[in-house]
Image (cartoon, grey):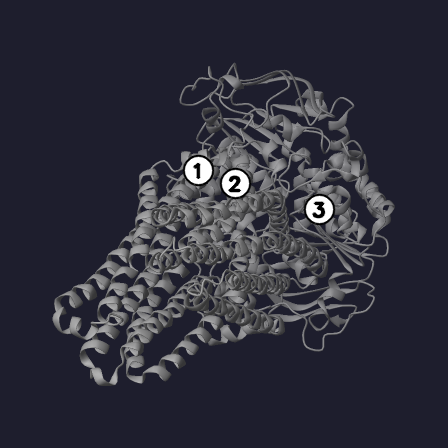
Amino acid sequence: MFQFKWLWENMKGSRRGYIIALCLSVVCNGLYITSPYFQAKLIDTFISNDNAIENLKNERTLFWWLIAGMIGLTFVRTVFQYACNMYYETASQGMIYNIRTKLFRRIENQDIAFYDRFRTGDLMTRLTGDLDMVRHMVSWVIKGAVESIALFTASMVYFFTIDYATALCILLMTPLILIIRRKLSKFAGPAYREVREKSSQLNTAAQENISGNRVVKAFAREEFEKEKFRSRDEEYRKANIKAAYVWLKYQPFIDVLAGSLSVVLLLAGGYFMIQRHLTMGQYVAISGLLWAVSNPLRNLGAYINDFHRFVASAGKIIEVYYFAPMIVDREDASTPAERLKGDIEFKNVSFSIDGKKILKDISFKINAGETVAVMGPTGCGKTSMINLIPRFYDADSGEVLVDGQGVKLHRLHALRKNISIATQDVLLYSDTIDSNIAFGDSSLDEEYVRKCAELSCANEFIERLPERYDTIVGERGVGLSGGQKQRISLARALAVRPAVLILDDTTSAVDMETEAAIQNALSNELDFECTKIIIAQRISSARNADKIIILDNGRIADMGTHDELIRREGYYKQIYQLQCGEEEGAVV
Amino acid sequence: MARNRYDIDEQLEAPFDFTHLKRSYKYIKRYKGKMIGALVLSILAAITGLISPLITKHALDVTIPQKNVGELVLLAGFVLVCNIVSVALGNIRSRIMTVVGQNIIFDIREDLFAHLQELPFTYYDDRPHGKILIRVINYVNSVSDMLSNGIINFIMEILNMVFILIFMLIVDVRLTFVALSGLPLFMLVMFAIKKHQRRAWQDVSNKSSNMNAYLQENIVGARITQVFTREEENAQIYDNLNKKYRKSWMRAVKFSNLVWPSTDNISTWVRAAMFIVGLLVLDPATVSLGTLSAMTGYASRFWQPIMSISNIINSFINNIAYLERIFETLDEPVTIADKEGAKDIGSIDGNVSFENVTFGYEEGIDVLKDVSFSVKAGQSVALVGPTGAGKSTIVSLISRFYDIQKGRITVDGVDISGVTLKSLRSQMGIMLQDSFIFSDSILENIRYGRLDATDAEIRAAAKAVCADSFISTMSEGYQTQVNERGSKLSGGEKQLISFARTLLCDPKILVLDEATSSIDAKTEVLVQKGLAELLKGRTSFIIAHRLSTIRNCDVIMFIDSQGIVEQGSHDELMAKRGAYYELYTAQV
C-alpha cells in the first residue's frame, strides 16, 4: 500500500528503532500471557492444594522463589514495556519530524499556483491535525495491530496444541469478522474524508477571521462571523458524529462476535467434555486465555476504523508532499558570477494566468544602473511583468533576459539573490524590526541595518519606538502605519544590496516629502550599483527615471523620459495634468 | 504583556486549579442528564457482563457432568443473549457520549470564538496569529474525550473500586488493609511523576504553539521568503522549532509512560504482600484458605481500576495543558466593550468632534496630545501630514477601536464611549490600509459591507468605484473565487473591492485610510467623480498623500507630531503659506 511505503520512506533514521519496538511489543505480550503463572502456582501449591499446609511448612524456599518470580517478572515486563513505548515514541516522532521538515520546504518553494489552490487554514490543518493522525497510526494503530495479530496467532497455536477440535471451532468464527470489516471499510473511508474536509473549512474560517480581525471590527460583523463560524463548526460536529456512528453501527457486530467466542467455547468445549474428548483442565486452560483471542478481534475493528481515518489524513498530506512546483531550475541552468550586473531585457514576452492574457508582446531593454519607472492603470499587468524577472512566473512566449542570459538559464536561487523586491503587500514577521530588515541576510550588523533604515527614511520613526530596533512588530506589521511598513519593507529590500531593485508601489502610503528624500537617497546615497525598477502611481515617483514605461492592458503603450512623455498626448500626460499640471503655472 | 514572537514561549497567566474544574463543569452541566444516562447504561452493561461467568460456572459444575446437552445449548444461548445485551447497552452509551463529547467541544469553541470577536486589536497585534488559531482548533479538539468519556470512565472505575473494596472488607478486614497498603505508595509515585509531567506537557503545548505560529507566518509570507531567497534559513529555523517540539514531547512521554509500569509493579507488590501476610504472618487459625484465595482474587481486581484511573489521570494531565490555554484565552480581558447601560446611538447625522483628546497605544507614549476639532455632518475632511503623525490613529478613534486616555470624542454630541459599539460602527464605513480579502467569491467579499444587499446593489457599488469593468473581464465575473494570497487580484484591484465593500454599507461617516494608494491616477479620478455623488450627505475622513485626492475636501487638517497644526480649505491653507503650502508646492 502506497501510504505505508510513504511512511516507511520517511522513517529513515528511525527504522531500526521502530522494528525493535515492534519486536519488543511482541515480547511484552508474550510476557504478559505468562505473567499469571507464578500467582497460579502459588495458589495451586499453597492455597487450593490438598496438602497446602504441609507445603507451606516444607517448601518455604519454593514459596519465596515464586514470590520473587512474580515480582521479578512484572519488573522485567514493565521495563521492557517502557523501553518498547519509548522506542515507538522515538521512531514515530522521528518520522513526523522528517515529514514536517519536508512539508515545510515543500510549501516554501511553491509558486503562486499552489497558493491559489491551498488556503492557509487548509495547509495548517494538514500540518497539525492530519499529521497527528499519521503519528497516531504509527505509534498506536500499527503497534496495536501487530500486538493483536501476534497475540491472536500465539494463542491460537497454543489452543491447537491443547485440542485441535475446540480450537478449530473458535477459529471458524473469525472469518465472519472479515465480512464486517469489508462493510465498515466501505463507509468509514468517505465518512472520514468528510470530517477532514469540514475540519479544513473550520480551520480556514477561524484563520481568516483572525487575520482579518480589523475588517471584522470595522464593519461590526462580529455576529455575522460568529454565525459563519458556528455553521462551519456545526458541520464539523455533524461530520464527526456521522463518522463515529459509522463505526458504532458495525462495532456491536464485532463485539458480539468477539464475545460469542465464549459461547462457542461453552458449546463446543462442553460438548467435547461430555463426549470425554476434552478434560476439565484443558477447558480451563483455553478459557483462561480466551481473551487473548477475543480482544485482538475486538481491537482489530477499531484499528481498521482508525486506519481509514489515517488514509483520509495521509492523502491530504501526501498531496502537498508530492506537489511539484512548476518553476524549478533547468538542468542546464548555471550559477552566474557572484553578482549580476543588472541588465534586463524583455523580448516579445507574452504571459497569461488561467487563460487570461496579462502581458502581450512586451519588449524593452534596461541597462545596468538605470532607473526605470512603470506606470499604467490598475490591473494592467505591472506587477505581473516585474514578477517575470525573478521567475515567480514563466512567460508563455518570448524571453526575459538578465545580463544577456535567459532567466531560465540562471539558477533560480542565484537569480533571486540578485533581485530584491519591496512588494506591494507588505508582510512583516512577528519579530524585531532589526530582524525584519535583516531578513535577506541575517548576518548583517546593526550598523548596516540602521544605515538601510536611514536610506529609506525609517530610522527616525524607529528611533521613536519604545524599544527602537528591538521592537517586535506584529504579524503583517500591525501597529505600524502603512507608510511606516512600506519604509521597513524598503529597508529590507536595500539590505541585501541587490543588483536589481524593484519597488512595487512601495511609496504609495508615504508622504511627498519623505518620498522625495527616499528618491534622493536611492539615486545618490546607495553604496552599491543597481538597476531600479519602480512601479508607481504618482508622477513624482516617476519623473526622474531614465525611462518610463507605460503599460496599458498588457501592452507597452508608450516609453520615454518624463520630458518626452509630457510632450505627447497619452496616459502619462493625462496623469501629469491631473496630478500637478493644471496648477503648475499658478504655484510655481 | 510584551509582544510575543514565534520563538518565545507564552507565559501562562493562570495555571490549572479548582476554579478551572468548576468552569469545565459549566460545559458538562448541560449534558448532565445524558451523562448520567450513559453512566447508568455502563453500570447495567457491567452487571450484565457479570452474569455470563455465573452461567458458565453452572454449566461446568452441573450441566456438563450431568451430560445434559439440551441444557448446555440453552445456557450457551443465555450467555449469547447476555453478551448481546451488554454490547447493545455499551453501544447506546457510546452513541450518547459521542454526541455529548462533540457538543461539549462545540460549546467551548463557540464561546472561545465569540470571545475572540470581542477582543481588541491589541490582542491580535501582540502575538502571532498561528498561536491563536491552534487554540481555537487543535486545543479544543484535544479536550473532547477528557470532558466526556474520560469523566464517565473515571466514575465507573471509582465505583468499581468501591464495590470491590466493600467485598474485601466483608471477607477480611486485615487483608484489606494489606491490599490498601499500596495506595500511599501509589499516590506518592503519581504525585512525584505528576509534578514533572504537568510542566512537561505545558512545555509541549508551548512548543507546538511556537512551531505552528512560525509555520503559519511562512505560509502567509512564502512570497517574501522567495524574494529574499531565505528558504534554507527559514527551514533551519523551522527545523529548530520542530526539534524543540520533539524534544519536549519525548520528555513529556518519558514521564507519562512511567505511570502505567509503576502502578503495575506496585500492584504486584501488593499481591505478593497478601500472600506473605496471609500465609506467613497472620495466625493460620484466623485465615481460612478460602478467604485467602478470594482475597488474592479481589486484590488483583481492586488494582485494575486503580491502574485504569492512573491512565485516565495521565491523559487528563496532558489535556489540562490545553484546557488551561483555552481558559486563559477566555479570560483575556475585553478592553473595548459596551459600557454598562450603553445605549444605542440611534440614527446619526455625522457630526464628529474631538475635545482635548489624548491617546497613546502604549502607556507613557502619547501619539495624540490634547487634540480638538469638530466636523459638521456632511463635511469631507482630509488628513494630511507626515507618516506616523497619527492620522490613522485619529480615524480609528472615531470608531472606538481604542479607548482614549483623556478627553472626549462625540458623534452628534453623544460621547461615543457611552454607546454600543455595534450601533456606532454599523453606521460607519471604514476602509483600512490593509484590504483583507476572504476566500470566497468577489460578490460575497463586497457583500460583507452590507449582508442584505442585493446583487444589483453590489454591482452598483462596484460600478461606483470603477471595479465593475475588471470584475466583468474575470473568468467567472462576480462569482470568481478569490483569496488573500492568490494571483487573481492585483493590489489595486483588492483595494477597489474593499472600497466597494465600504461604500455598500451606506455609512453616515466614511473613513478612507489610504483607500486609493494603489489605484492608478486615472481610475482614481473616475472613482472620485463617482464618489462626489456618494459623499453627499455623509461625513467623510480621507487620509491620502496624493494632493489630487485631497484638494477638493471641505476641510484639510495638517497633522504632524505637534498635533493639528493647520486646518482649513485648500484655498485658505494655500493663502496661509504654511506647512500645507510647502507640502503642496513640493509635490508639483
Asked if the residues shown at circle 3 and circle 1 are in contact, with their CB atoms under 8 angstroms apart, the answer is: no
Locate residue B229, reporting x and y percent. 47, 32
Q: Nearer the viewer, residue A390 or A576?
A: A390
Separation of marks 1 and 2 at Cα, in angstroms: 9 Å
Which amino acid type corresponds to the residue marked 1 in the rendered image?
Leu
Residue drawn at the location 21% of the way across and 76% of the way down: B279
Judging by the rendered image, the residue that carries numbered circle 2 is A314
Which amino acid type corresponds to the residue marked 3 in the rendered image?
Ala
Q: Residues within 10 Å of mark 2 (few under 14, many from 20)?
A: many
Asked if the residues shown at circle 1 and circle 2 are in contact, with their CB atoms under 8 angstroms apart, the answer is: yes
Name the side, left or right, on which B426 lies relative to A260: right
Judging by the rendered image, the residue that carries numbered circle 1 is A7
Classify mark 2: helix, strand or loop: helix
Which chain letter goes with mark 2?
A: A
Q: Nearer the viewer, residue A359 or B356?
A: A359
Which amino acid type corresponds to the residue marked 2 in the rendered image?
Ala
Dot in front, 2 or 3? 2
Separation of marks 2 and 3 at Cα, in angstroms: 44 Å
Classify mark 3: helix, strand or loop: loop
Locate residue A300, reporting x and y percent. 48, 49
